[in-house]
Image (cartoon, helix red, strand yellow):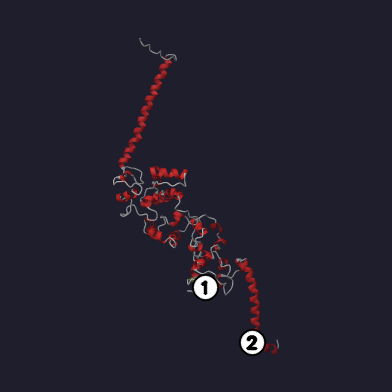
């Protein structure tokens, strides 16, 4: 290159050339972006570091028309621990309409409307979850805008792994689930938090039930139906018949069997099998023990080992019950020499007495038949002549 040629490439000329080049690149990128937005592919999308270059700044918000603040900051450390980050999911997989800056103008007027813009985003990867029947889904389809959607329970930027390699829920995540449900059901959560189950769950005890243990995860049944009520004893029995768990706390594992064997349980079982959609006024577990307010059996205020508390539970269905009424119930324990010994020994007596009586009667009947048969054989098969009455 000659001296005159080098002199021609002055700084102003370089700037002009660079501006033209950038303009051409920008035009090409704009066209390419349009094609990518129509059919995003992860290998052609911008990496997360591009998005986090701006969004990692703390305290970033956008004011919506309602005056609410939309928080748009993403903590890289928290996102890095999330299941989506570990799976290599790019921001643009969910934010399919954002590929450049400035971002497209948002039409959402409030935070709820903004959330609903992404109601079907999770379907890209989790389509099967959208097929399950749930009371939440039914409420949403019936027009309730406040019915929970995926992102109300799962924060996509911080959602941790919830299942292990065997497909079991991780205990730590299981214990956090009541706090998620509390976002909508706070009154029930406050009640549950003070119960024998809730207090233990808050201490990290994985033996006790939390919300999803009884109600399920995505396929949540309507708990106000007759079918749910009739199925509830078996639901409680799944834990209370588990010997491994119950032995830790000295509780009987005969809960479900003793319930089914008594008048209440027998009737409920018949309804469950023959008329699952029909109401019954027979007591199920939570009629006596409570629903979300279950207390320890020795709790002085509500424990059913306390006779007065048991009487109050009975009087819900038996208003005329007196103080002696609860004595007729043997709890969920099978009579033994140490528990209800009188009932145990009476039962034991009849276990021998009844077969003995029936056995003696059977021997008597058989001996009578034997005598009649042998007598007839001796007479050659002829019946004895009837006696002639004197006139």
Which residue in the rendered view is the most extreme toward the front?
A: 143
Counting from the top left corner in percent of width and height, residue 180 is at 45, 62
- The residue sitting at 62% across, 67% down in the picture is 38
- The residue sitting at 60% across, 66% down in the picture is 42
Counting from the top left corner in percent of width and height, residue 253 is at 39, 47
On screen, 387 above or below 345?
above
Residue in front for this viewpoint, 145 or 154 = 145
Mark 2 crowdedness (10 Å alpha carbons): few <14, some 14-19, many ≥20: few
Residue in front for this viewpoint, 281 or 83 = 281
Cβ atoms at labels 2 and 1 below 8 Å apart: no
Residue in front for this viewpoint, 116 or 201 = 116
- The residue sitting at 64% across, 69% down in the picture is 35
Mark 1 crowdedness (10 Å alpha carbons): few <14, some 14-19, many ≥20: some
Mark 2 or 1, nearer chain start: 2
Q: How many marks?
A: 2
Counting from the top left corner in percent of width and height, residue 133 is at 52, 54
Q: Quadrant of the C terminus?
A: top left
The image quadrant that residue 215 belongs to is bottom left
Which type of secondary structure does the marked residue at label 2 adopt?
A: helix
- The dot on residue 171 is none
Residue 164 visible somewhere in the drawing: no
- The residue sitting at 43% across, 44% down in the picture is 269
Q: Quadrant of the N terminus?
A: bottom right
Which type of secondary structure does the marked residue at label 1 adopt?
A: helix
Residue in front for this viewpoint, 350 or 249 = 350
Q: Residue under circle 1?
A: 55
For marks 2 and 1, give the CA distance.
35 Å
On screen, 101 above or below 290?
below
Counting from the top left corner in percent of width and height, residue 358 is at 37, 30
Residue 32 visible somewhere in the drawing: yes
- The dot on residue 12 is 2
Which residue in the rendered view is the most extreme toward the top?
A: 391
């Amino acid at each position: 290159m000659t001296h005159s040629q080098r002199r021609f490439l002055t700084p102003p000329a370089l700037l002009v050339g660079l501006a033209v080049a950038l303009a051409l690149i920008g035009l090409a990128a704009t066209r390419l972006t349009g094609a990518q937005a129509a059919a995003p592919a992860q290998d052609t999308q911008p990496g997360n570091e591009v998005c986090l270059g701006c969004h990692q700044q703390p305290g970033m918000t956008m004011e919506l028309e309602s005056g609410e603040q939309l928080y748009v900051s993403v903590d890289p450390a928290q996102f890095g621990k999330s299941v989506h980050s570990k799976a290599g999911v790019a921001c643009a997989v969910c934010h399919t309409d954002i590929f450049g800056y400035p971002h497209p103008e948002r039409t959402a007027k409030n935070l709820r409307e903004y959330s609903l813009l992404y109601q079907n985003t999770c379907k890209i990867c989790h389509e099967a979850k959208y097929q399950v029947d749930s009371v939440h889904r039914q409420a949403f389809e019936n027009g309730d805008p406040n019915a929970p959607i995926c992102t109300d329970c799962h924060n996509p930027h911080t959602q941790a792994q919830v299942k292990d390699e065997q497909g079991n829920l991780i205990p730590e995540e299981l214990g956090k689930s009541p706090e998620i449900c509390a976002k909508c059901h706070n009154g029930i959560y406050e009640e549950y938090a003070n119960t024998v189950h809730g207090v233990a769950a808050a201490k990290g005890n994985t033996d006790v039930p939390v919300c999803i243990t009884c109600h399920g995860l995505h396929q949540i049944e309507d708990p106000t139906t007759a079918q749910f009520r009739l199925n509830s004893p078996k639901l409680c029995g799944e834990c209370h018949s588990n010997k491994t768990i119950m032995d830790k706390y000295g509780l009987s594992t005969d809960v479900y069997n003793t319930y089914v064997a008594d008048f209440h349980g027998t009737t409920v079982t018949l309804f469950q099998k023959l008329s699952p959609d029909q109401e019954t006024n027979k007591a199920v577990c939570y009629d006596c023990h409570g629903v979300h307010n279950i207390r320890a059996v020795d709790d002085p205020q509500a424990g059913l080992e306390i006779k007065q508390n048991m009487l109050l539970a009975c009087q819900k269905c038996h208003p005329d019950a007196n103080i002696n009424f609860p004595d007729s119930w043997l709890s969920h324990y099978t009579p033994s020499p140490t528990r209800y010994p009188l009932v145990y020994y009476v039962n034991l007596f009849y276990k021998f007495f009844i077969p003995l009586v029936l056995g003696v009667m059977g021997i008597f009947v058989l001996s009578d038949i034997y005598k009649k048969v042998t007598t007839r054989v001796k007479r050659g098969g002829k019946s004895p002549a009837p006696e002639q009455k004197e006139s």
